[in-house]
Image (tube, helix red, strand yellow):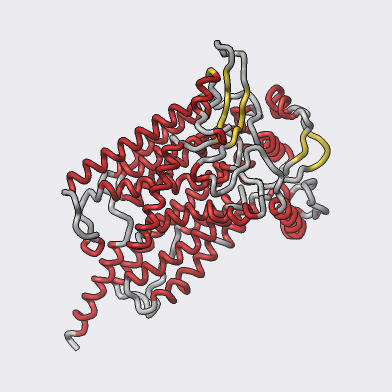
Amino acid sequence: MTQTQPVKAEPVRVRASRLRDWLAPPVTESRAWGWILPLLVTAFAGFLRFDRLAVPNAVVFDETYYAKDSLALLEFGWEHNAVKDADRMLIEQGPNADIWGEGPAFIAHPPAGKWMIAIGEWLFGATPFGWRFMPALIGTLSVLILCRVGRRMTGSTLLGCAAGFLLALDGLAFVTSRTALLDIFVMFWILAAFACLLIDRDVSRRRLADLVEQGRGGPLGPFVMHWWRIPAGICLGLACATKWTGLYYMAAFGIMVVLWDMGARRAARVPNPYAGAVLLDGILAFVLLVPLAGLVYLATWWGWILRPGGWGRGTVADNPLLRPVEALPDLWNYHKEIFNFHNGLSTPHTYQSWPWDWPILRRPVAFYYTEPREGCHVDRCAKEILGIGTPVFWWGALIALAVLIVVWLARRDWRAGAILAGYLAGWLPWFVPALRDRTMFLFYATPMLPFMALAVVLVLGMLIGPARPRPVSLAKGPQLLHPEQRRILGAAVMGAYLLLVLINFAYLYPVLAAKVIPFGEWDARIWFDSWI
């Protein structure tokens, strides 16, 4: 009997140690630099996005819908029809212009993103700067979050900042951050949800390791509360409340966290890891990521629910406390109409593209184009906003994603799997409507951008190698180069690649930011006929 305690104690320590090996890599830099450098990259991204934000002084592409709908939310609480010349009147007369037509407007997307655009219009008026303010702010904050996410996933502040740097210099991220469209908000909330789930992964695994060491839990293992899944559920709800494409990420992330939980309990070698992951983690994960997100989604419809007059709203209860309940049937019918609209949307468009076109940037979107005389000192000039990604970044990301597929299949590296899940959740679902000729555009790929950047920096990090020896359980066999030589070579490759992305973005900048340039210079930047 006296020997039973040491025999049981040693395996517990081994289990906990093995579980900690599969946490995110330890960060080698100080916590101060972990914030200073990301904030510097964010400031750079912010300068790019806010500089000349009011240019052009015109309604750009689908701003004609979202700028007016957002203004209507401020005025009525729901989207309202506007007169035909509302574009001119919004710019010249501001938010008090008499632009409203007859009755409510039918809309194609939920209101969360338009509420965010409305914040800028409330602060700065219904002007180009006003309706572009929040996209620019959210696009800038996305860079900060990505820097921190990359730092957590790679264990390197420099690699994390490289991910943010790539997002800051991507042409599509830049353009969607400077126009009042919805896709940048979808990207932001999905990235924020992903960041919360990463934090939860580390926090919950450390807690599980502690409880295992203490001998807590039965055959299923100990119960661990995943607090960070609450803000993740809120963020996913806001993503879905901006565009329904957030549902794809909710499904992908839901599967991902269940697999993480199974892996954690298996690494801790509890007797029934899969049953424990489903019963102790999975059910609660569903509640925190689905019903909670649903409540958040409903809350964004508050103006339509609580105020009379919205599209299909029907009779409104006299008692405001009863309105949320009696509004649900009308809201359900409204959603069926929206679904039917999207399901039948097949009207040909000049700039439409297919999901298999997106990774290679075959067909971008001309958000704005004119040939002005003012500011033009040659015979012919061009002024354009071309919604296109930075080619060096996008084509490099294709190679990185292919590498990560091999890495995940060979090593089951959780980071590679998470990045691939995020990328594929934004890409694969579009193949089904594409087969029905559903109209779609390149900027629908905006939520995939952070995962492309993470793919690139993760592969670069693998090329550079770890800053310190990894645990024995994670060793990957013999190395062809001495670690110091490998790090020098890898750092040189990373620096060269980031420099190429910077040069590529700078070259395209005039056609991304509506600069007036000679037509010949514009034509030189249009590399393929399909870009026109």
Left or right: where does residue 412 sit relative to residue 486?
right
Front in this rendered view, residue 285 or 25? 25
Front in this rendered view, residue 90 or 453? 453
Left or right: where does residue 343 sit relative to residue 258?
right
Q: Residue 9 falls in which quadrant of the image? A: bottom left
| Residue depicted at x 71% and y 44% | 347
Q: How many marks?
A: 0
Visible residue check, residue 146: yes
State which quarter of the image contains the N terminus.
bottom left
Q: Residue furthest front?
A: 529
- Tell me where residue 70 appears, x and y as whole percent: 67, 38
- Tell me where residue 319 appears, x and y as whole percent: 78, 55
In the image, residue 518 sits, relative to residue 502, either above or below, namely above
Front in this rendered view, residue 384 or 31? 384
Visible residue check, residue 322: no
| Residue depicted at x 58% and y 34% | 179
Q: Residue furthest top?
A: 377
| Residue depicted at x 52% and y 48% | 189
Front in this rendered view, residue 64 or 193? 64
Q: Residue 222 falls in which quadrant of the image? A: bottom left
- Tell me where residue 456 appears, x and y as whole percent: 38, 46
Q: Residue furthest bottom?
A: 1
State which quarter of the image contains the C terminus.
top right
- Tell me where residue 483 appears, x and y as whole percent: 18, 49
| Residue depicted at x 54% and y 45% | 357
